[in-house]
Image: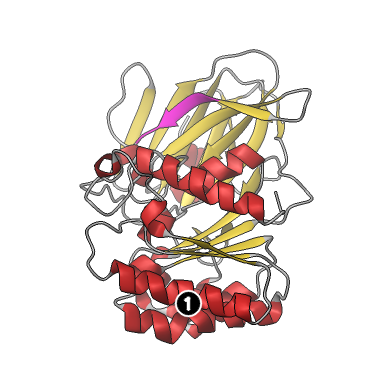
């Protein structure tokens, strides 16, 4: 069966899928979408309204379609599953894996009697060659079917690509498979908001479920919003106004790496905090300086600007502010093993960042 028989606008994509499947085009009422939303007019998934992104800067306008932090939760008893996806242009970056930049990761979720959720790998959907699976590739997309181990209804979470846009996403399950909603995030904790650079966006994790926010989300079963924009998070007033309009439990402010210099931070950092604080007088704010501290001689000066925002807020009576020194995000030992290029974290670096940020989040009393 060709997928264009189900969705005619796939006719030009050249993607065949396995026969005897039922197809669900995301968004679909059986699947819960988090971290991104689908703009039907633009036919793409976005992290903020495109009308807002266009007013921030050209980089944010472009990267707004990258689905960093996008997740889909659902349940099924299927023994196999296909992912059919199309992009504007499939980008695979030289210092990232194909899975990390443009693929999908499926994890099985299991809730225990104590309410804790455990995870195990279920399937990886990677652009490129596979062995022993059904695969079809087109100019800017692919379709892959993978086997799902297990019996009965199981809960899953599907992580969307970190460094690519997604125009169309269709999940295929056997025709006789049941499908429904998955596990829910905690209802007593609003999403955690992360605003920052390419590091915040997820560069350069090997998989889309590895950025530090994903670890924290799994450890606490809390939703999150990833507003990381490679070279685009500059603390503009338009970005600050949008951030202040969001209903979140914690705001993690992490754009030091994108600021061109300490002077830029002095001009924007405290202003962004005050814009957010005006709308959210009691919401915890965590200030972070850049983790790639060692190779940047300006890092100490930049850190002092961020720390001064924090200290001034404390002096003015704000008890809901916190500071993470980026120099300690990678720990004390084997720091040289925490990045792929001296700047962007690898999986070790992201895990260490997650542990540090999680410890600070616990101090807020929100988790």
| Residue 191 image position (x, y, % from top left) | 66, 56
Q: Quadrant of residue 113?
A: top right
| Residue 218 image position (x, y, % from top left) | 59, 38
| Residue 324 image position (x, y, % from top left) | 48, 59
| Residue 160 image position (x, y, % from top left) | 48, 45
Where does label 1 land, which residue? 308
Scheme of colours in the image = secondary structure
Q: Kindly identify the residue that appears in the image at 38 percent across and 44 percent down.
A: 331
In this view, the residue farthest toward the top is 151
Is residue 18 visible in this depiction of the protein?
A: no
Q: Kindly identify the residue that appears in the image at 36 percent across and 38 percent down.
A: 348
Q: Does the magenta stretch include residue 18?
A: no
Q: Is residue 125 magenta?
A: yes
The region drawn magenta spans 120-126
Tell me if mark 1 has few (under 14), some (14-19) or many (20+) residues whose alpha carbon lies within 10 angstroms of its own: some
The answer to whether 261 is drawn above or below residue 47 in the figure is: below
Q: Helix, strand, or loop for circle 1?
A: helix
The answer to whether 135 is drawn above or below residue 352 in the figure is: above
Of 268 and 168, nearer the camera is 268
Q: Is residue 311 left or right of residue 228?
A: right
The answer to whether 272 is drawn above or below residue 81 in the figure is: below
The count of marks equals 1
Q: In this view, does 282 lie to the left or right of 142?
A: right
Q: In this view, does 62 lie to the left or right of 278?
A: left
Q: Kindly identify the residue that appears in the image at 49 percent across and 30 percent down.
A: 82
Is residue 113 visible in this depiction of the protein?
A: yes
Of 245 and 99, nearer the camera is 245
Q: In which quarter of the image is residue 336?
A: top left
Q: Kindly identify the residue that appears in the image at 58 percent across and 61 percent down.
A: 193
């Amino acid at each position: 069966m060709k997928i264009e028989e189900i969705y005619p606008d796939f006719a030009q994509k050249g993607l065949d899928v396995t026969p005897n499947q039922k197809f669900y085009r995301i968004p679909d009422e059986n699947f819960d979408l988090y971290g991104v939303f689908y703009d039907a007019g633009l036919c793409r998934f976005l992290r903020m309204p495109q009308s807002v992104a266009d007013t921030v800067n050209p980089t944010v306008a472009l990267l707004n379609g990258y689905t960093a932090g996008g997740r889909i939760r659902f349940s099924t008893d299927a023994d196999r599953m296909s992912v059919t996806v199309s992009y504007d242009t499939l980008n695979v970056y030289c210092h990232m894996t194909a899975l990390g930049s443009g693929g999908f990761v499926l994890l099985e979720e299991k809730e225990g009697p104590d309410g804790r959720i455990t995870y195990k790998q279920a399937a990886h959907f990677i652009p490129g060659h596979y062995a022993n699976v059904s695969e079809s590739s087109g100019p800017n997309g692919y379709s892959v079917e993978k086997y799902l181990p297990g019996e009965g209804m199981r809960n899953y979470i599907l992580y969307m690509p970190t460094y690519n846009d997604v125009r169309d996403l269709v999940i295929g399950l056997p025709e006789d498979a049941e499908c429904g909603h998955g596990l829910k995030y905690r209802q007593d904790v609003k999403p955690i908001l992360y605003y920052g650079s390419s590091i915040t966006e997820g560069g350069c994790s090997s998989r889309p479920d590895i950025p530090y926010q994903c670890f924290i989300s799994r450890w606490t079963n809390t939703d999150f919003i990833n507003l990381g924009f490679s070279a685009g998070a500059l603390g503009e007033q338009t970005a600050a106004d949008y951030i202040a309009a969001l209903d979140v439990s914690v705001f993690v402010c992490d754009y030091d790496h994108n600021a061109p210099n300490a002077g830029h931070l002095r001009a924007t950092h405290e202003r962004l905090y005050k814009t957010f604080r005006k709308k959210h007088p009691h919401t915890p704010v965590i200030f972070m300086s850049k983790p790639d501290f060692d190779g940047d001689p300006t890092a100490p000066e930049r850190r002092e600007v961020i720390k001064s925002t924090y200290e001034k807020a404390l002096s003015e009576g704000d008890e809901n502010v916190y500071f993470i020194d980026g120099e300690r995000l990678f720990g004390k030992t084997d720091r040289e093993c925490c990045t792929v290029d001296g700047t962007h974290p690898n999986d070790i670096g992201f895990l260490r960042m997650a542990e540090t940020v999680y410890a600070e989040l616990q101090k807020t009393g929100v988790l």
